[in-house]
Image (spheres, grey):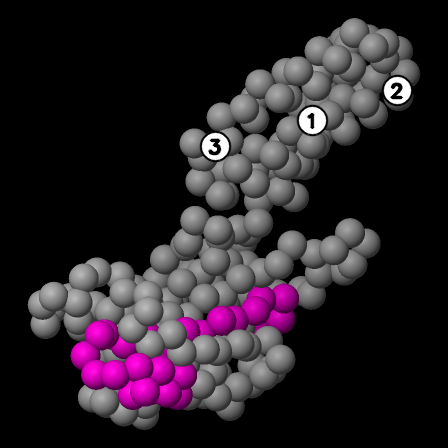
Amino acid sequence: MNKFKLGALVVAVAMATAGCADMSQTQQSTAMGAGAGAVLGGLVGGIAGPGGAGRTAAGAAIGAAIGAVGGNIWGKHQQDQKLAMERATAGTNVQVTQTADNRLKVNVPADTGFATGRADLNPALRPILDQLATTLVQNPASLVEVYGHTDSTGTDAINGPLSRQRAQNVASYLSSRGVAPNRITSDGLGSTQPLVANDTAANRAVNRRAEIFVREPAPQQGQPQPQARAY
């Protein structure tokens, strides 16, 4: 492949991914992976033998398809896990979403998940955590972060320890259901990260919550990825 063809290929890929700033994280990952794959595929196509631009273009197309899959951090494992958690939380006010940085987020309102002013898990929360633990055991590549939050009622001396203990109780419950403790981190953030202003009773209820984030780090180059089982 001559320098002109290589330069044209790189410029085309750059133009295809130039809009990444306006994309979601999933779309950005896909686009960047596709771009890298296209360059690699084009190089392979051009080096492999005669055929000129046609072979180069075909190689770029194949490379882009491979790159899109490899660059998309939110994969089938996470999507299956999200669907399983949506089924487990149906009919509750627990929210299951995909974040902009491709983590699975389970938002548990404190009034649903815990006794008032206490860190004890409510019975209604246990089946939800059971399902979450099952999906975590089935996907050993995933890691978990648990954060406790309070409203602004009360002092930091009360809110800090309460939010930490709630997060720790969620983490301990997941561990008791087979999730390795070294895969889980937890912390309490008190009233420092409200979702809305603490100016009404309804808003304070929104801010009292536990947030569970599940992420699957991209595997290191040359490192085998743990195999997930079907949910």
Neighbor class of circle 3 (other Cα within 10 Å; few <14, some 14-19, many 20+) is few
For the image, the number of numbered tags is 3
Disc 2 crowd rating (10 Å Cα; few below 14, some 14-19, many 20+) is some
- Which dot marks residue 38? 1
Secondary structure state at the residue bearing disc 1 = helix
- Of callouts 2 and 1, the N-terminal one: 1
Alpha carbon distance from label 2 to label 1: 14 Å
Where disc 3 sits, the SS reads: helix
- Magenta stretch? 137-165
Q: Relative to 199, is 172 above or below?
A: below
Q: Quadrant of residue 36?
A: top right
Q: Residue at x 27, y 91 (%)?
A: 118
Indicate the amino acid at tag 1: Ala
**Relative to residue 167, is residue 140 drawn left or right?**
right
* Point 45% across, 66% down: residue: 213
Give the foreground label among 3 and 1. 3
Question: Is any part of residue 81 visible from this angle?
Answer: yes
From what the image shows, is residue 183 above or below residue 118? above
- Coordinates of residue 38 in the picture (x, y in percent): 69, 26
- Mark 1 neighbour density, 10 Å: few (under 14) some (14–19) many (20 or more): many
